[in-house]
Image (cartoon, rainbow, N blue to C red):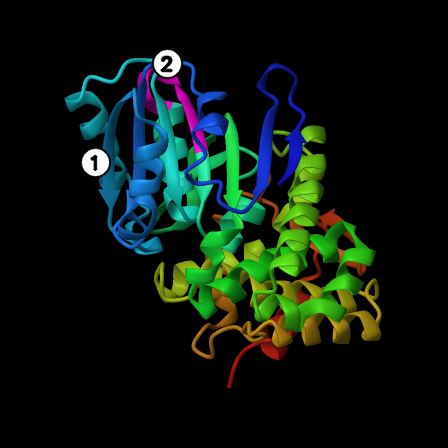
Amino acid sequence: MHTLTVDLADRTYPIHIGKQLIGNSTLLAERIRGRQVYVVTNETIAPLYLDAVLSSVQGYQVDTTILPDGEQHKSLEVLNRIFDGLLTARHNRTTTLIALGGGVVGDMAGFAAACYQRGVDFIQIPTTLLAMVDSSVGGKTGVNHPLGKNMIGAFHQPRLVLADTDVLHTLPERELAAGIAEVIKYGLIADHKFFEWLEENMDALLQRDEQALAYAIKRSCENKARVVALDEKEGGVRAILNLGHTFGHAIEAAQGYGQWLHGEAVGAGMVMAADLSHRRGSLSAGDLARTTALIERAGLPIKAPADMMPEDFLSLMGVDKKVLDGRLRLVLLQAIGEAVITTDIEDALLQETFAACRGQ
């Protein structure tokens, strides 16, 4: 088992990465402060792993909500089911919510924990690669609005992250590729050596080699933990973690949440960000080619949907969280391993990127 630490003073918490962690009652008990536990999962994950979690929290008052599966259910309406369950079972402010699932479950359970009685503890047990390397770490929680992804939410750090690599054996191939998109992101924004490692080991990741997966998760979490410790609430450097996301969120919203997986949209979005970076003269043609090739090797889209017009992107990107004082902010690349945040975006070059990166 590898253990990393997200260093946030009195809210510091561990990330444990390894095998057979879901049923580890000792690790959970160390981070549960009260006598009540509320498990939030979904209808896909519950038959696979809920019993293991319930067996690890015996001796507590334990209640459960099972949500429908899918990004299209990440809404205030569905979130209210968690509050209904907490109130009906009379959970108090010493309760601990456990998020058992992928990014949707983690974001929703975390947001519920941030709001319930003005803030209670929660624990992340991610069951997808994307959640292990990205959404479970850093305290971003929230739900979607029809006009924008994750526009309603809060920063609320977990008490613990348990990343059990055994669960990745049941992960569909499409979900695996979606998680690899976020892994590639860390290499692109701040870790050139990791990007090179991914070029050499992409086949092993796609074949679910245990050592390769464990290393990729560890290195990704190290990168994210370092950035979050520097800038918890995205006032500055943390925004580099959004490489490809402004484009990607527009794709998700335009296509309907759940039609494109988050990682698929981010994959295409990172190609768009790299393309724009090259057109602005900062990213070399060689680095653009390497970026596009690695994303394609992961089984991810490298083109935006053919039916998305430039005006669709601009309209949806205009309500993105990263817009500041009416100006669009984008994360672009100076080189592989070096990201930059800018509002100095030439409209003509952006239009060229929309045209070049649109599917046929």
What's the residue at 53%, 66% (across, down)? 177
- Residue 324 % position (x, y): 60, 40
Q: Secondary structure at mark 2?
A: loop
Q: Residues within 10 Å of mark 1 (few under 14, many from 20)?
A: some
Task: Say which residue label 1 marks.
Answer: 81
What's the residue at 70%, 56% (across, down)? 345
Image position of 291 (left or right of 174): right
Above or below: residue 48 compared with residue 154: below
- Residue type at numbered disc 1: Arg
Task: Say which residue label 2 marks.
Answer: 34
Any magenta on residue 118?
yes
Residue 33 or residue 294, whichever sits in front = 33
Above or below: residue 157 compared with residue 128: above
As measured in the structure, the alpha-carbon distance from the residue carrying label 1 to the one carrying label 2 is 22 Å
The magenta span reads 115-123
- Residue type at numbered disc 2: Gly
